[in-house]
Image (cartoon, coloured by chain):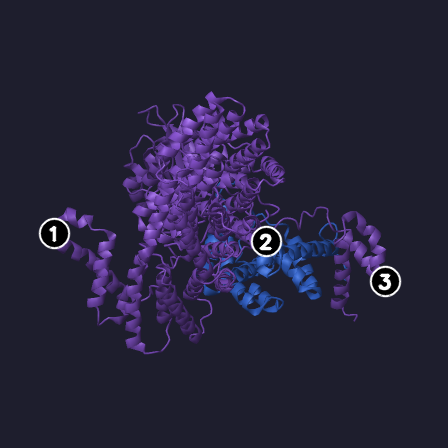
Chain colours: A blue, B purple
């Protein structure tokens, strides 16, 4: 279990307690698998032919299948999105820390290199901005979490959050506009809070 | 109100207002929305500026499965020695390692090989690797690339030398050559043969995909990398999780860590077939977010190839060729649950072969599961000729196949059950020492023997006893032997009573619900209702508001109410809706949802709520097409059959015909000709065929359906036989085969003496139609009596305004006219006339009453008769349904001809009368009295024009037909005699 991630979870009180508990269960599995995927990624060549996310899917599915709580698909999707956000943010933090020589020796940088992650700082900026957005309207932040960090479409986001597709689309337009304004043209930070 | 949160709430609300507007109108509205709040204005302006446009950062998920790094160079230079092989060059690389072209370095052979170099870690488990390798080396089949050699390279990596195959991936090969469907299927069968050979040698491929299935220059297939995935798995941390998998081709069990078996290859073959048929994979997983990819593979069934092909601009094979068999074959191969796929590759191959030979394919279990899940079937009886009869309902014999609630936890109990079941077979062997005789014992006999044993043995094991009651009752349920289900459930209830007294338990509730349903299925509605209400009470005491047993009890109560309550009573709808509410909330993928939606639509139709009914049937069709049910083609066929039947009932034949013809074809193959749904779809289609003047085909189809029903009680029983006979009788009456119609209906009436006395609708329909047949046969007194009985039954059924009643009114009016009854015959016809609905064709009741009315006017020489006849014919000819109401056109033409003749316009009358004869000859039996009448009409016209020779020939023909009838209404003979008299007088 990655303690930084779990600490982050503890502090994210905008998600229901049950979802946070599930997400905390999912994090170590998804985290370990992300690393394994990264390692395998370096060896795989035949682009598009090999499902490099197998292990990750495997673990997630085991949880999904075995834990009674995950029979509710909305809860599972919601918890996975939260878990994914914390994993990715944590990765980015560890890597930037490593670049600054501040430890995090347990992360092998080269494991992660080939993952199609955006620039670490940009991802962290989105995350920080999202925390500010959550203070204004948590629902908008949840939509971004599902769409951006978990990669859900409108329908999955709607299921995860118990909204209609239509509200998801509208929330996304608003949240996206707010984030773009907040992050500035280059994804950097600018202070223009409402 | 100035904290950031409420401030933002204001901004967001204003932003919503702007976003509701079209993009171009937003700027203009900005000032209005912001009012005189400059800060709000600034906020909105800056946010609007960020709407739209591209955001490279935000518009892509943070983490995707994008593949990278394809261009890294190979690790071995040309000329490097690996074992006894010399590297020639890199062929490619995959998840498992690198592949080189190589040749023998010892010069013994000129042969080139494909040299696979695995990852270094593999060497740690070299012994396992060697065992696997030896197994693979034994594979010797022309369709499988041989494993030649293997060992450890100098750099520590294990290697394998495989036969080098020069060829193209099967999908590319077919695409390049634009191979037709037959060619593709033959190649696919070759692939299956090779895989089946490997399976016989206990080798599973595990990674079948187009890249591993090559077609060589001579057009033969060759499979690569057999078992390699396992081999790699064997050496990689003792598990196969990291073995290479191919998106879209990897089976669910490979992703979830389930057992990889031959079924895993069946799945991949199903996907390969899909790609061969459509030229594409159902899903593009690369680039999908992780959880979406997970969801696709593990949850969503692929679309049917036919429907998928329909979405492609240029499918390699037209979608219509894939519909039915091939859809079903692919669906069965790629089921998520391995045990629901083809049990063996050979079975898959055999189905493709059957399809090529145009024989019924075996891919039907899923369909069967669905069909067994149906609650009820309903038989709409068609209208024909002057007598029209309407539907009532049929309880389907096959009800909801509810899962047996077998507690799987306790191994001991399971063992006892297993021992018991094995015992059933052993007893059979003891009773039938001759093996051949023992094998001939039917499943039903075995079950009977088992059911007896539960009664006599196992007294000391109440748990096992209870479980076996459930299991055996469930099996009887599958065999649709509801009497035996009822017996077993009664015994179980007695057991529970002894054990628990009046204490409620889930077993008790379930047994009550099962018993109630079994009683309903055997038409013992009063007992059924009592049991089902008791079941609901038990459940209430247990605070059970949503169990499957409760859904079943509610659905069965709906069924009982449907059969026993008058159409206006909302009970049937309310119970069924309650069941559907539970299902939609807790079990929306259950096929019982389909059954409930279907039943609700039928109830609405029964209540005359046509809009609601049509919406319900369309919902049924949409559900059957939805992802949850789309691998069960029978569900869709059934839905098509229902909607088509409904539309046909509304005279929307053009819409109904293709749906019904598809439904019959699919059901006949997938569910089998004996299945109740198939029989029902045939009846519905026959109605449309009859309307389209393809009466011979319609009669043949109905004859088939009836023969099936009479032979096989399980195909429907009385509730299906009775209306089918009515339908066929109506058709026979319309074709002028009165005797046959009479026989069919008499058969029904005899049947009702012993069975189905509660089927009030069918009895009323039979009697009503029989009355009109008797009328045509001149048995006037009997006709009157049966008509009265029919009306009484309709009143008892609480359905006095049904279409049967409308038709009875017409018959009553004709009887009154015939008898010369005093009173307002014209008024009776007017009373029988229901005006057509806007989106409906001309209803039979309307036409037949109208014709009767004009006839009375004509008889009493009313001035308006000619005009009325002209108007009616005009309406028929102008109707978009004209082609479907030829029978009425014939009658109308004849009537107008007669009216014109009466007013002395013989020359004008002739073409109308001639047209009537033509239509009749094409529609009717050669000896039809209707045809004879049309000839007499035309003859009369010719006599008036002094053309006796032609007239005589027609009258002779008519006389010959009429002589062949055993009994005939005297009006036929009267008009013939009158014409003969005129002919004689004219001479």
Marks 3 and 1 close (CB-CB < 8 Å): no
Distance CA(mark 2)–CA(mark 1): 63 Å
Instruction: Give the residue pinned by disc 1.
Output: B433
The numbered dot on residue B113 is none
Instruction: Give the residue pinned by disc 3.
Output: B37
Any part of residue B87 in sight: no
Question: For residue B665, which quarter of the picture?
Answer: top left
The numbered dot on residue A155 is 2
Foreground residue among B475 and B720: B720
Foreground residue among B190 and B701: B701
Distance CA(mark 3)–CA(mark 1): 98 Å
Quadrant where the N terminus of chain B is found in the figure:
bottom right
Question: Would residue B938 appear left or right of B127 to someone viewing this image?
Answer: right
Q: Please state the chain letter of the residue tagged with numbered disc 3 in the rendered image.
A: B
Give neighbour class at mark 2: few <14, some 14-19, many 20+ (Cα, 10 Å).
some
Image coordinates for residue B613, horizontal then vertical, percent: 54, 53
The kind of secondary structure element at disc 1 is loop
Distance CA(mark 2)–CA(mark 3): 37 Å
Q: Kindly report which numbered mark, 3 or 1, lies closer to the viewer in this rendering.
A: 1
Q: Are marks 2 and 1 on the same chain?
A: no
Q: Residue at x 30, y 32 (%)?
A: B141
Q: Residue at x 19, y 48 (%)?
A: B439
Q: Is B491 drawn above or below residue B356 in the view shown? A: below
Question: Would residue B33 appear left or right of A96 to someone viewing this image?
Answer: right
The kind of secondary structure element at disc 3 is loop
Give neighbour class at mark 3: few <14, some 14-19, many 20+ (Cα, 10 Å).
few
State the residue lying farthest toward the left. B433
Foreground residue among B840 and B984: B984
Give neighbour class at mark 1: few <14, some 14-19, many 20+ (Cα, 10 Å).
few
Q: Residue at x 36, y 64 (%)?
A: B514
> N-terminal of the two: label 3 or label 1?
3
């Amino acid at each position: 279990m990655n303690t930084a991630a779990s600490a982050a979870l503890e502090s994210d009180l905008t998600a229901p307690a049950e979802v946070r508990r599930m997400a905390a269960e999912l994090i170590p599995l998804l985290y370990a698998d992300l690393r394994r995927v990264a390692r395998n990624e370096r060896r795989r060549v035949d682009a598009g032919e090999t499902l490099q996310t197998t292990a990750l899917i495997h673990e997630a599915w085991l949880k999904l299948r075995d834990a009674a709580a995950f029979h509710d698909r909305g809860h599972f999707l919601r918890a996975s999105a939260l878990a994914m956000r914390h994993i990715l943010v944590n990765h980015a933090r560890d890597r930037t820390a490593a670049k600054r020589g501040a430890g995090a020796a347990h992360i092998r940088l080269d494991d992660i290199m080939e993952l199609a992650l955006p620039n670490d700082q940009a991802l962290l900026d989105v995350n920080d901005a999202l925390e500010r957005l959550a203070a204004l309207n948590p629902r908008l932040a949840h939509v971004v979490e599902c769409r951006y960090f978990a990669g859900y479409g409108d329908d999955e986001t709607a299921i995860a959050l118990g909204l209609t597709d239509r509200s998801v689309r509208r929330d996304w337009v608003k949240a996206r506009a707010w984030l773009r304004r907040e992050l500035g043209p280059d994804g950097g930070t600018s202070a223009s809070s409402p | 109100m100035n904290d950031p949160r409420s401030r933002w709430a204001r901004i967001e609300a204003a932003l919503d207002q702007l976003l509701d507007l079209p993009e171009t109108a937003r700027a203009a509205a900005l000032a209005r929305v912001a009012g005189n709040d400059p800060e709000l204005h600034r906020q909105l302006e800056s946010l609007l500026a960020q709407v739209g446009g591209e955001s490279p950062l935000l518009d892509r998920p943070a983490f995707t499965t994008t593949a990278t790094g394809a261009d890294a160079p190979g690790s071995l230079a040309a000329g490097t020695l690996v074992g006894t092989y010399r590297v020639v060059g890199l062929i490619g690389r995959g998840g498992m390692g690198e592949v080189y072209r190589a040749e023998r370095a010892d010069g013994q052979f000129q042969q080139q090989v494909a040299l696979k170099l695995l990852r270094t870690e593999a060497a740690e488990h070299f012994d396992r690797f060697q065992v696997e390798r030896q197994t693979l080396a034994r594979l010797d089949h022309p369709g499988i690339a041989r494993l030649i050699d293997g060992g450890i390279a100098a750099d520590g990596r294990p290697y394998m030398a495989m036969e080098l195959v020069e060829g193209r991936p099967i999908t590319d090969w077919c695409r390049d050559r634009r191979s037709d469907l037959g060619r593709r299927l033959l190649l696919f069968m070759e692939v299956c043969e090779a895989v089946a050979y490997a399976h016989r040698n206990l080798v599973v491929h595990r990674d079948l995909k187009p890249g591993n299935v090559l077609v060589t220059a001579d057009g033969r297939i060759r499979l690569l990398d057999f078992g390699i995935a396992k081999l790699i798995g064997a050496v990689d941390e003792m598990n196969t999780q990291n073995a290479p998998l191919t998106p879209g081709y990897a089976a669910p069990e490979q992703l979830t860590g389930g057992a990889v078996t031959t079924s895993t290859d069946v799945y991949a073959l199903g996907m390969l077939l899909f790609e061969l048929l459509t030229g594409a994979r159902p899903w593009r997983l690369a680039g999908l977010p992780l959880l979406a990819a997970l969801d696709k593979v593990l949850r969503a069934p692929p679309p049917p190839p036919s429907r998928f092909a329909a979405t492609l601009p240029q499918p390699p094979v037209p979608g219509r060729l894939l519909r039915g068999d091939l859809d079903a074959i692919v669906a069965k191969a790629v089921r998520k649950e391995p045990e629901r796929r083809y049990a063996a590759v050979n079975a898959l191959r055999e189905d493709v072969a059957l399809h090529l030979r145009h024989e019924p394919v075996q891919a039907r279990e899923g369909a069967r599961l669905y069909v067994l899940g149906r609650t009820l079937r309903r038989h709409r009886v068609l209208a024909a000729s002057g007598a029209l009869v309407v539907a009532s309902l049929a309880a389907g014999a096959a009800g909801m196949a509810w899962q047996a609630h077998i507690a799987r936890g306790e191994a001991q109990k399971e063992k006892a059950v297993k021992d018991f079941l094995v015992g059933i077979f052993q007893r059979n062997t003891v009773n039938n020492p001759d093996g051949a005789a023992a094998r001939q014992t039917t499943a039903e006999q075995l079950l009977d023997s088992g059911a007896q044993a539960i009664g006599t043995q196992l007294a000391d094991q109440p748990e096992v006893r209870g479980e076996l009651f459930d299991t055996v009752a469930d099996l009887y349920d599958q065999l649709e032997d509801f009497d035996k289900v009822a017996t077993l459930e009664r015994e179980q209830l007695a057991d529970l009573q002894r054990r628990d007294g009046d204490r409620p338990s889930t077993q008790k509730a379930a047994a009550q619900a099962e018993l109630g349903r079994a009683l309903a299925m055997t038409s013992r509605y009063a007992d059924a209702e009592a049991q089902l209400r008791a079941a609901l009470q038990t459940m209430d005491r247990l605070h059970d508001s949503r169990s499957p047993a409760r859904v079943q009890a509610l659905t069965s109560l709906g069924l009982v109410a449907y059969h026993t309550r008058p159409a206006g009573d909302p009970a049937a709808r309310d119970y069924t809706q309650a069941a559907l509410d539970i299902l939609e909330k807790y079990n929306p993928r259950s096929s019982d949802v389909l059954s409930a939606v279907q039943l609700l639509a039928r109830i609405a139709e029964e209540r005359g709520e046509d809009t609601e009914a049509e919406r319900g049937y369309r919902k049924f069709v949409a559900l059957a097409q939805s992802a949850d049910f789309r691998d069960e083609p029978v569900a869709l066929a059934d839905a098509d059959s229902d909607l088509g039947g409904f539309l046909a009932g509304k005279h929307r034949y053009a819409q109904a015909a293709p749906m019904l013809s598809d439904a019959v074809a699919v059901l006949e193959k997938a569910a089998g000709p004996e299945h109740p749904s198939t029989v029902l779809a045939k009846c519905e289609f026959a109605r449309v065929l009859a309307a389209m003047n393809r009466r011979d085909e319609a009669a043949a189809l109905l004859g088939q359906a009836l023969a099936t029903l009479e032979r096989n009680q399980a195909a429907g029983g009385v509730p299906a036989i009775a209306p089918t006979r009515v339908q066929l009788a109506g058709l026979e009456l319309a074709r002028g085969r009165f005797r046959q119609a009479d026989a069919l209906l008499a058969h029904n009436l005899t049947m009702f003496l012993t069975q189905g006395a509660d089927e009030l609708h069918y009895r009323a329909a039979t009697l009503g139609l029989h009355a009109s047949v008797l009328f045509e046969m001149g048995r006037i007194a009997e006709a009157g009596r049966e008509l009265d009985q029919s009306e009484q039954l309709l009143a008892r059924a609480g359905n006095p305004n049904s279409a049967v009643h409308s038709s009875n009114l017409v018959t009553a009016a004709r009887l009154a006219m015939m008898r010369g009854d005093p009173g307002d015959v014209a008024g009776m016809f007017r009373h029988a006339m229901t005006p057509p609905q806007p989106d409906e064709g001309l209803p039979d009741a309307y036409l037949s009453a109208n014709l009767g009315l004009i006839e009375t006017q004509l008889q009493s020489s009313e001035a308006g008769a000619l005009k009325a006849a002209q108007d009616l014919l005009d309406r028929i000819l102008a109707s978009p349904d004209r082609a479907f109401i030829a029978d009425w056109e014939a009658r109308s033409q004849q009537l107008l001809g007669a009216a014109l003749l009466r007013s002395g316009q013989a020359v004008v009358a002739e073409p109308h009368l001639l047209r009537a004869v033509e239509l009749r000859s094409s529609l009717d039996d050669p000896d039809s009295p209707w045809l004879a009448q049309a000839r007499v009409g035309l003859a009369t016209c010719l006599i008036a024009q002094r053309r006796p020779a032609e007239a005589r020939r027609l009258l002779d023909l008519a006389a010959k037909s009429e002589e062949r009838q055993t009994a005939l209404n005297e009006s036929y003979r009267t008009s013939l005699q009158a014409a003969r008299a005129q002919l004689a007088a004219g001479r």
